[in-house]
Image (cartoon, grey):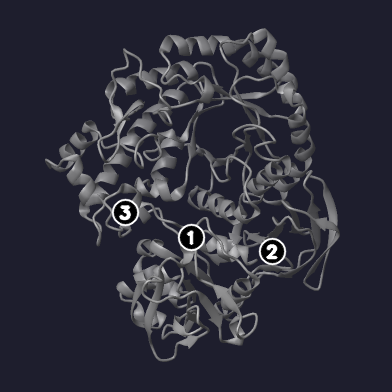
Amino acid sequence: MPSHYTLRMQFGLHQSPADITQKIVTTARLAMADEIMLFFFAEELNDGHDTLERIDQWIEHSRPYRQALQEAGVALSLNPWHSLLHTDRFRQRKPDQRWQGMVDQHGTECTAVVCPLDADWRAYYAETLRRYAREHFRVIWIDDDIRFHNHGPLDWGGCFCPLHVAEFNRRYGLQATRAAIVANCTAPGEPHPWRAMWMDMWDDTQLALITNWRNIVEAEGCRLGLMSSEMGQHAAEGRYWERWWQAFGGDQPPVHRPHFWGYGECAGADLPEFIMRLDQNRSIQPEAIESDPEIECFNYGRWNKPFRQIGAQMALAHILGSTGLNISLYDFMGNDPDDEPERAEFLCAWRPTLDWLADQFPMSLQPMGIGVPWSQEMGRRKHTDGSGNWQSLVCSTRGWGRWLMGAGLACTARPAPAVNAIAGPVAWSCTDEQLHAWLAQGLLLDGGAAHILLQRGFGPHIGVRDGRMITQADACYSVEECRDPAFSLRTGAGISVNAGPYAATIFQGDLLPGVRLASMLCNPTHEDVGHGLTLFENALGGRVAIVPWQPHDFVVAMTIQRAVQLRNTLRYLAGNSTLGAAEGGPWLTPQFLTDGTIWRGAVWNTSPDAIRAITLTLPEGMPVPTAAVHVDGEGQRHAAQLRDGQLQLDRPLHQWEFVVLTDA
């Protein structure tokens, strides 16, 4: 199947439809667009919730160029800028919009963002959808503002308004206040029963609303699409994804627009984050789905994000299995597409390779590698920090992915059959059955996860009798010194643990006999003050490695010493299995995928330094690829050679370029 280009555009009521029509049709043709997604009242042209009369003006105003696009064979979809509204940005509800505003955990109320339980707003929004659906758009998108989190200026988000508190009390026969609900739901220790009850109420009421919306748009032959945000935040809302797909799809495959890449230019070290985000989204999607990731470029144009990075973003979407691309290269203010004709030229140049990638990487493929498992139950099961803030229910889930892929190791957001890696509080969301299974294989733990497993009674299986989290105030650690040559670049190699969030708190355990010490923590005068990396073979037949520090989602302190230590540790954990890996320079990031029959691979260079040769280790079960194709930063393909585990390139592999491993 080829790629599917959807260009996202907006033209305002202040512009002449006659001036717009030919320009938008010409742009669609030059950019090889299959579809145009129109915005109504988005971003700079948003004045809060538009009146029904104003919405009618948007519909009528856009009719000439919508008709011209349809006659040109270009499909149309619609993205009304809001349901609840993303954020106030000093907008106000209009005088006759006497709706309940969204309220945060402290009682702060929005001036424009609304509560989804307000009956009058529900009637208003249902009517807007009826009017949109009568225009027969292919998809009408519900933007990610349907979430509870991230509605500025609220703290974390909402909604904790009187309507939600009353609904909670009605459902469960209580007389609780907002303050009591928040305090109980965020209390430390074993989660209070009210947390699951509150999240169930949130989820149930949202899904009833969305099901009604789907019925409205499907009655006119349209589809209802969902944009989603970050999984850790959605888990803090208690979102159950199977139910959301049913609400959006009904009897048809749901339509999804996952967010996965930063809006502006990002560092090469961020690529593992984007891989893990999209893989997390793919891991909760049903087998039958239209998955069209959002290719963001906001605020607008090549000063914000270069074309070679946008090309990489589009390519990654297809490598991880997508039916199409929702491309945000054009602004919301209706500026002339001809202001920067290079945008259409860029999309046209990349189209043949993206069609090829869509064909090479069908949606049946699943990523293989070290498992970095997570759970939609995270927000329901996590033990909080006792701060009383709803943000304490948000769980970091991708830290190991950034560190391990940063060391050149392939990872997946799904549990893996050979080796898994758990970091921090995500360990609360793993079931006892899952942990027993992973402990009988190979398991990498950071200090936070080791401390949680110890509290959960798994100490004998991880090599720890007792333990605690400490800071530099307890032991002035600054260097991790490698002592075991099997797990280091060389004996005596030093790795900094002096500063950075990953080393702010570390785990120190009372270790069981049989634990192998691979490194020690030293103070500035080089005295031993604690243990570093530990390795243990348990009675279940598994191998466990614990690093005392804690990887974080957005900070990676990688050096050659740390990279070699991690590679050797993961090889030990894998035992007789091989893990996919790439070596030959910093920030080489490998991906391997299979559906059990066909295999594919990709190796990215996100370092500014060019690479000419890469040493590959193929994952267990992958046959040697018969073809290697270098995709450059302009979307052009060049032959590469794979000989005896070495990728040899005829031209340098520059930043944001990649090599595809496939059959002939």
214 over 200 or under it: above or below: above
Disc marking residue 552: 1
Residue for badge 3: 380
Residue 232 visible somewhere in the drawing: yes
Q: How many marks?
A: 3
In the rendered image, the residue lying farthest to the front is 525
In the drawing, does residue 268 fall left or right of residue 544?
right
Mark 3 to mark 1: distance in Å? 21 Å
* Image location of residue 344, percent across then percent down: 75, 30
Q: Residue type at mark 2: give it.
A: Pro
Q: Residue type at mark 1: give it.
A: His
Mark 2 to mark 3: distance in Å? 38 Å
Decide which of 296, 203 is in the foreground and name it: 296
* Image location of residue 268, percent across then percent down: 65, 53
Decide which of 451, 415 is in the foreground and name it: 451
Residue visible at 38% across and 62% down?
Answer: 425
* Image location of residue 394, percent across then percent down: 38, 52
Mark 1 to mark 2: distance in Å? 19 Å
Quarter of the view holding residue 291: top right
